[in-house]
Amino acid sequence: MEKGKPGRKRKLASLTEEDYKQISAWAGDGLNESQIATLLNVNISTITREKKRNEQFAHAIKKGRYKAVQLVANKVFENAMDGKETSAIFFLKNRDPDNWADRQEVNYNLDLKNVLTSARSRIIEHHVPAQALPKRTQAPTASASEGVDE
């Protein structure tokens, strides 16, 4: 018996054109990579590795997803042209977000340095020395507290 290379055999090394079509169809039907891995009886890490190693495999998944997006986009466009309001709004928000976004972005520039400087100068101008305040508003001193009966 002749020995081969050590290590595990690649489970997806011998995919046929039919296999690639099936993988593309699964991706187009909305299955995620974890679900495709289950259908191929491999681990998700095998899918990730195979996409890096095998361009045809990665392309099959991308092609399936792209076809699905294209079909849905065409349907949304048809619905928008047929006057279906929700589809029209969705189409416009995604194709022309500068004019149809729900949220408008507004930028303001505030010069807080001038505001703080102005506030600081008003505080200094209106500062009243403690001797000018009536006695009841002044803080008690040590001599004032000595006259309290015990």
Image: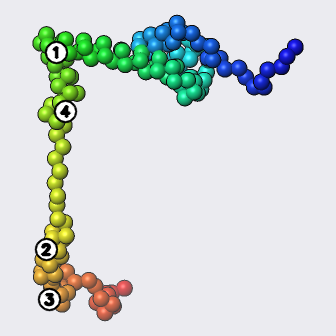
- Position above or below: 109 against 33: below
> Do residues under tags 3 and 2 come within 8 Å of each other at their CB atoms?
no
User: Mark 3 or mark 4: which comes first in sequence?
Assistant: 4
Q: Position of residue 76 (x, y in %)?
A: 23, 15
Query: Disc 1 marks which amino acid?
Result: Ala
> Do residues under tags 2 and 1 come within 8 Å of each other at their CB atoms?
no
Q: Residue at x 73, y 23 (%)?
A: 8
Disc nearest the viewer among 3 and 4: 4
- Residue at the spot of label 3: 132
Query: Disc 3 marks which amino acid?
Result: Ala
Please, what secondary structure does the residue beneath circle 2 have? helix
**Distance in Å between CA atoms under marks 2 and 1:** 56 Å
Check residue 118 in the rendering and tell me which mark sits there, or answer none.
2
Q: Residue furthest right?
A: 1
User: Mark 3 or mark 1: which comes first in sequence?
Assistant: 1
Disc nearest the viewer among 3 and 2: 2
> Do residues under tags 3 and 1 come within 8 Å of each other at their CB atoms?
no
Check residue 97 in the rendering and tell me which mark sits there, or answer none.
4
Q: Is residue 38 visible?
A: yes
**Distance in Å between CA atoms under marks 3 and 4:** 63 Å
Q: Position of residue 106 (x, y in %)?
A: 16, 47
Q: Residue at x 30, y 12 (%)?
A: 71
